[in-house]
Amino acid sequence: MSANAREIIAGGIVIAAAAAFALYARQSTGIGTGSGDRYPLHASFRSAEGVSVGTDVRLAGVKLGSVTDIRLNPETYRAETTFTVASHVRIPDDSAVVVASEGLLGGSFVEIIPGGSLFYLEPGDEIEDTQGAVSLIGLLMKFVGSSAVAAAESESAPE
């Protein structure tokens, strides 16, 4: 086999591997899906720490969409987010939205907690019931601070 034929075969393998990777990335991230199969919703959070454009939106652990816009409202000092949801999923209008964490070291995602209403959100509606991100560092500082206070009180208490 000539060197030219080997180079062509190697190039074909590299192109096939790149195409397979691009297809996998497109399917796993939802990039390139048409806007016709998703609809936008809005939510306002006190803290959207860990959320950015592209963050997953999940319901019962299943990815339904992603965050498409996030910005600070200068009047309310809240994080205004816009996210998309798959059009085949109807969200009750009394649902809640929470910024959740995948674990201690994991990233954040937006979780929809469905309500029990018989009425559903329409494209562009805002979900009123929201809960922002809980800061792990803030929780640890409270724990350490309360432990230090308790230790100081126990040392100064007469026996």
Image (cartoon, rainbow, N blue to C red):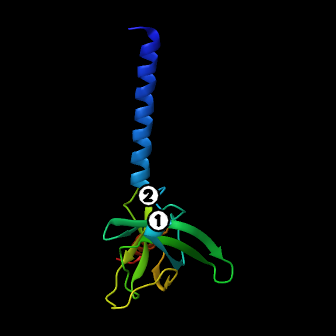
Residue at 43% over, 71% down: 85
Q: Which residue is mark 2?
A: 30
Quick check: 149 above or below 76?
above
Could you say which disc has been placed on residue 85 in the image?
Answer: none
Residue at 37% over, 61% down: 102
Residue at the far right in the pictured view = 74
28 and 57: which is toward the camera: 28
Q: Is residue 9 visible?
A: yes
Q: Secondary structure at mark 1?
A: strand
Kind of residue sitting beneath label 1: Ser
Which quadrant is home to the C terminus? bottom left
Q: Which residue is mark 1?
A: 66
Kind of residue sitting beneath label 2: Gly
Q: CA distance from mark 2 to mark 1?
A: 8 Å
Other-residue count near label 1 (Cα within 10 Å), few / some / many at <14 / 14–19 / ≥20: many
> Where's residue 31, x and y in %?
48, 56
150 and 59: which is toward the camera: 59
Residue 16 location, quadrant: top left
Residue 81 location, quadrant: bottom right
Residue 99 location, quadrant: bottom left
Residue at 42% over, 22% down: 10
Residue at 34% over, 81% down: 114
157 and 9: which is toward the camera: 9
